């Protein structure tokens, strides 16, 4: 079974631009979560989507948004990029059936550099 | 609110020596606990998890962790370190009662010396 895939793997953008990152979960997984990883703040939760609905949201400004499609693929968008948005963005998928098992599988991440 | 504290941002051990990475958590409800490993330029790989039942959890690559509720700890151990164990290790917690996000510790970088 294929793992979580993220595209692109590397991205360089300029301040003020916007960016869209893509994530394809493991087949059959309906939950997709996004995390930001930086040296200073570590791993921080952005949001989670389940069956095309945002189910949880972290403490990030409104410039960060996401969506999920009917095939469970997810995208996240960051508008008006700032230098501090430079980070590794990780996507994780999970069965998240609500029965209590919450094992998340992570993709390789997208390394975003804002100049 | 949940939180995770990993003691020691960097741990260095000799090849063949015991690996001990410390994790303490704070949670107002019964937790799920996880250890993940991250190799350079890669995502996170699940090493092991604790949900309910046996408090000693065995994971991949010879790692294990013990859930101690009284100490609110979930330390990761491996009897004999291998060079390939050099990586960043993250402890994480989520609420047992539902599908809540993972809260991660700051991570511990493990170096293995030949």
Image (cartoon, coloured by chain):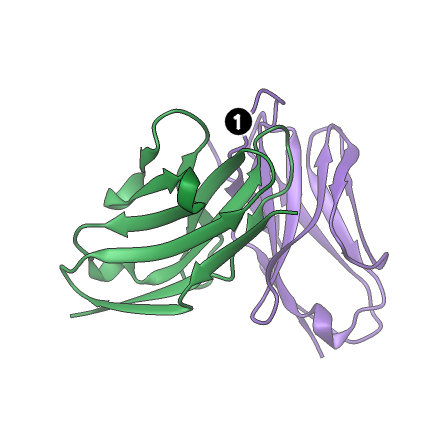
Chain colours: A purple, B green
Q: Secondary structure at mark 1?
A: loop
Residue A59 found in image quarter:
bottom right
Would residue B86 be found to the left or right of residue A50 on screen? Answer: left
User: Label 1 neighbourhood size at 10 Å, few (<14), some (14-19), many (20+)?
Assistant: some
Q: Is residue B46 visible?
A: no
User: x and y percent of residue A100 in the render?
Assistant: 56, 24
Q: Which residue is the extreme one toward the front?
A: B70
User: x and y percent of residue B113 in the render?
Assistant: 20, 71
Q: Which residue is the extreme one toward the bottom?
A: A115
The residue depicted at 42 percent of the width and 53 percent of the height is: B23
Q: Is residue B68 visible?
A: yes
Total marks placed: 1
Would residue A38 be found to the left or right of residue A115 on screen? Answer: left
User: x and y percent of residue A110 in the render?
Assistant: 60, 58
User: x and y percent of residue A40 in the render?
Assistant: 59, 71
**Mark 1 lies on residue:** A101
Residue situated in front as seen by the camera: B22 or A3: B22
Residue A33 found in image quarter:
top right
The residue depicted at 34 percent of the width and 57 percent of the height is: B21
Which chain hosts label 1? Answer: A
For the C terminus of chain B, the image quarter is bottom left
Residue situated in front as seen by the camera: B96 or A49: B96
Above or below: residue A32 compared with residue A70 = below
The residue depicted at 34 percent of the width and 27 percent of the height is: B54
Above or below: residue A38 compared with residue B90 = below
The residue depicted at 35 percent of the width and 32 percent of the height is: B55
């Amino acid at each position: 079974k294929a793992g979580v895939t993220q595209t692109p793997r590397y991205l360089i953008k300029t301040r003020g631009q916007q960016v869209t990152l893509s994530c394809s979960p493991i087949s059959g997984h309906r939950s997709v979560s996004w995390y930001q990883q930086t040296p200073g703040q570590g791993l921080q939760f952005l949001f989670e989507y389940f069956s095309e609905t945002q189910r949880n949201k972290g403490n990030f400004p409104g410039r960060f948004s996401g969506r999920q499609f009917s095939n469970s693929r997810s995208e996240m968008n960051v508008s008006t990029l700032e230098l501090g948005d430079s980070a590794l963005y990780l996507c994780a998928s999970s069965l998240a059936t609500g029965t209590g098992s919450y094992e998340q599988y992570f993709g390789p991440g997208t390394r975003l550099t804002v100049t | 609110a949940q939180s995770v504290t990993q003691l020691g941002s960097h741990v260095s051990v000799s090849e063949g020596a015991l690996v001990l990475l410390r994790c303490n958590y704070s949670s107002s409800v019964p937790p799920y606990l996880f250890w993940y490993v991250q190799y350079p330029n890669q995502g996170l790989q699940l090493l092991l998890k604790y949900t309910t039942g046996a408090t000693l959890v065995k994971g991949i690559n010879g790692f294990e962790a013990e859930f101690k509720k009284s100490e609110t700890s979930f330390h990761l151990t491996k009897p004999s370190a291998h060079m390939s164990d050099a990586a960043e290790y993250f402890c994480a917690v989520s609420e047992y009662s539902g599908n809540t996000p993972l809260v991660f510790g700051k991570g511990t970088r493990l170096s293995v010396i030949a």
